[in-house]
Structures are given as structure tokens and as C-alpha cells.
Image (tube, rainbow, N blue to C red):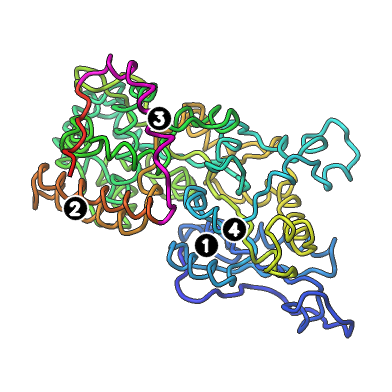
Amino acid sequence: MVVLGAAVVLFWPERPVPAAPTADASAAADGHKFVLRMAAPQSYLPGSLPQGVGQPLQGLARVVADFEARFPDTRVEIIAVPIEREFLVTQLSGGAAPDIVCVNVEDVWVDVQKHWYVPLDRYLEQPNPFVVAKGDPRAPGTRQWWDMFAYQAITRGKAAPDGRNYCISLDMVETGIFYNKTLFAAHGLRPPETWSEFLVLLQRAKELGLTPLLTNVDCLADWGADLVFDQFYRELLPGIDVKKDDPVRAAYLQGYLDPEELAFLQRQGFFTRRDPRYVEVWRKLGELRPYLTKDINNQDFVREFVTQQAAMIWNGSWFVYRLHADKQLGFDWGVFYLPPMFPADSPYASGLPMCVIGGVGNQLEVTNSALSDTDPALPFAERMARSERLQRVVALLQFICLPENTDRIVNEFEAFVPNIVGVPARPQLDPFVEILKRRYTTTKWTYSFDLRFTDILKRTLHLYLTGAITLDEFMRWQEGNIATASGNFVQRMNFDFAPLQQEWDRMAPVRAGFRDLPTPPPAR
């Protein structure tokens, strides 16, 4: 559920008002020393009904109530805010954002130089005091808060390009192809092992009079583009990964192309009509069009699957809850991942398994609002050191990470895989636990640049997939779109390409062994 408009306080009881003075001006009216504002992840918003099924959620509210009981001088407001980047940028730039927000960390990366977000490394590298208080010296979190996270490589791999960590990854998420297992068995169908087999399966489903695959242009522009891109570019990384990550980040990201690298490569002719691999990405996605629902702009295509008018649906792990909670579903279902491409499918296919495009799910960040009890004129590091309010905000996140609390929040319904040691995933999520063992994607296009870039991509991809424009016309649009987005990024970040150029020149011998690389555009 996305709540648009102004932030709204939800389901919070009235509190008595002591007469004592307070240290936090925002809390003075109700007598609490601290009033912390937490923009709850939409998936855990108290009082909401996930996917319109089951009982209203209360897990996060109960955990917060326990936190307030331990800290009577603190009140926590759980609020709902729009997830659109424009809203967050407006709030952050004006110092009016909630103390804790839930934002995809790739969006955080592009703004870290503005001091909108608080790096959490100093806290993650220290013990979690709530774990220490329990007195078990072997418990994860006794030595470092870091030790509490189950998916270590993924969690630590979300460090920003500046090497610092800005988010707490409470859970994991991934996509998959949900299929009607009963229908498959009745017609002798099985999950595919290659892209070619996938296309044959889609055709068979179409011949049965069904919609073969339910998805929309948003999923194709995001998930689809990243998966196919990884298939064609992964093997090029030794010759094009011009910005080496620190060891902690590299252990999971394994050569992830950050926005500045994409911008640099675009200037070398990559991601243009002169780049045959990039053209091939979109040609392969175009192969799916005959098998998709007619309206690929549709944002609500679940009904067609649950009424057995469609054989498969591409959705996220959160869809498990919708299916599991439906007592009148009438069929068994399963999950498989998009199959890999081999040279028989495309001359640029690697044959490697499709990568992870999900990873961390709900990502919690601390904003500069947590420092509102300090002088804004002070250096940022000094404000962090002096802020009592920040200490209390961090304490809330540490409290949430206790296994019993994460269990109450994440496992309230089957949607996400918990990322805290000692908190098991719901059994229905086992297919996604397996998928998450794969390597991470080469890049995430929709989180690399601005919303204008993503909007143009989706609009033109829709035109291409519906036959309104040709592949070449789509490529012309996309080439200009990337060039503009890259230019805006470089200008905004005032980025110096000299170190990347130096690394590019050094790796020239590696690229000499590659075929069909693009040529740089003519010098102006």
C-alpha cells in the first residue's frame, strides 16, 4: 500500500503530559524528551492489510511499544510517507524528513555527499547493547551489531561507493516466476532450464488458451532489463569495471557498475546503438511480448492468475502471502527463476545462472533529522558525536534487530526472508532462500540515475513492446536517455573521470580478447 500526500500518524494512543521541561523542542508539547518519527516500510505499516488479505498488521507497533516502555522519555511516531524520490528529496533538503526512512539504498548512494543520511558504521562495529544486556557471551551482536545479520555478504555489500554503510537491512526479497503447478502437471509441462525452453513453455501455454505470463512494463524495465543485461555483460567486467570496490563491498557486489561507471562507459560507446550487446538486451526482452497480458501497463494483474486464466506470473516474494492466505485458490503453485541464456539463445549469452536482482528488502536509513538537537553549523561528524537524539534513534534500530522483535515484524506474514540470525524464514519462502544464494546483478539501471531516466525508459519500452515503435527507434530514444541522465549525474556530482580513464587504459590488453565491443562516438 502506498499512501500519497502528507505524512499521517497512524494508530497511536494518547500519552500523559508531564510538566517537566524537555530537551527536544519537537517533543516539548507532550512532555517527552524525544519524539522520534519513523517512516514505516509499507510492508510493515501498522493497521494496514497486506494485499487486502488476513488481519491488520501490528507487529511493528508492538515492538515500538516495548521500546517506549524501556525508554519512558521517548515516543515513536510511526508514519506513512510517499516512497517517490521527489518527496524524499524535498523533505531531506529542508531538514524535515522523518528520523528513519525506508529507501532503496541505491537512491541513498547518490546523495551521501549532501549529508542527508547518517553513516552507521561506528554503531555496527560496536556491540548491540540490548544483546549484551541479556548476558549470553556467544549471542550474535555481543561483539558487533554486524554479527546479527544472517546474509553477511549481501548486507555488507550494500556499503555506498564511499565505503560507508547507511542502511539496516532487516529482510531479504527476490522475484520469481510463480506457476500453476496443477495446470503444469495436467498438461505435462515443467519449469524450463534454458531461455529457449522458456519460450517453448510460453507458446504451449498460449496454445492452451491461457495468458502465458503476467507481468507489466515496470517489471520488464527493472527486473527484466537487469537480468538480461547481466547475462550479456558479466563476462566483460574484467575489462570494463573501471572503479574497484573496497574488499567488503566487492565480496558481494563482485564488480557492480556504479552510476559513474555507467556514465563513463556510455562515453566509450557502450549502451548505444553501436553496442550490439545492449541492442540484444532489448531484442531478447521483445521475444516475451507475444506471451504477455495485453495491457502491460496494468498494475494489478493478480486476479487473472488466481482465477486460472494465466499459467504464470512474475512477481516478488511478497506474493507468497497472497497465495498462501487464499483458502479458495483451488490449485497448487510453485516458483522457478528465470532460466539462463546459452549461445544457442544469443551470441552474447554466458550460460551463467540468472543473477540475484533483489537482495536486501526493506532498507532502513537514519536521516539528518536525527541530529536536530545539534547546531547545524558544526561539522557533520561533530554533530553525530554530540547528538543524544541520534543515540536514541540508533537504539530503536538496535532494538528492532533483536531476533524476537524481527520475528514479530518480518514473519507476521509470508513476504520477506528475515536477515537476523536466529529468525527462520517461513517455509513457503524456501524457493527464495535458494535464489538468494546466487551472485548479485551487474547493475541496477532504474536506481542508477534519476526518475526522468526511468520514466522515459518505461514509456518508450511500452511503445516498443506494443509495436508502436521499432527496436531501432527505441534504441535511439534510449541512447539519448542514457546520455542525458549520465550528463546530469556527472554535473550534479561534479565527477572527475580522470581516474576511471586511467584504469580504462590500463585494462586495454584485457579488452583486446573481447569481441564486438562498441566504438567510441566521433570526437566533436
Image: magenta residue range: 492-515
Label 3: state its secondary structure: helix
**Can residue 477 be seen from the camera position used here?**
yes
Q: Which residue is mark 1?
A: 49
Name the residue at 28% across, 40% down: 266
Q: Which residue is mark 2?
A: 460
Quarter of the rendering occupied by the C terminus: top left
Badge 3 density bin: few <14, some 14–19, many ≥20, Cα 10 Å: few
Q: Provide the secondary structure element on which disc 4 rests.
A: loop
Image quarter of residue 504 = top left
Q: From mark 2 to mark 4, how far is it between C-alphas?
A: 35 Å
As measured in the structure, the alpha-carbon distance from the residue carrying label 1 to the one carrying label 2 is 34 Å
Residue 275 is left or right of residue 97, and the answer is left
Q: Position of residue 437 (x, y in %)?
A: 51, 27
Q: CA distance from mark 4 to mark 3?
A: 29 Å
Camera-side mark, 4 or 1? 4
Q: Which residue is more in the foreground, 417 or 358?
A: 358
> How many C-alpha atoms fall within 10 Å of the one at disc 4: few (<14), some, or many (≥20)?
some
Residue indicated by mark 3 = 502
Q: Earlier in the sequence, mark 4 or mark 1?
A: 1
Instruction: Please tell me whether mark 1 or mark 2 is closer to you in this view.
Output: 2
Q: Amino acid at mark 2?
A: Thr
User: Vertically, is 120 above or below 391?
Assistant: above
- The residue mark sitting in front, 4 or 3, is 3
Q: Is residue 393 magenta?
A: no
Say if 360 sits above or below 14 in the image.
above
Q: Residue at x 77, y 55 (%)?
A: 395
Ranked by sequence position, the earlier of labels 2 and 3 is 2
**Which residue has dot 4 on it?**
115
Question: Under tag 2, what secondary structure?
Answer: helix
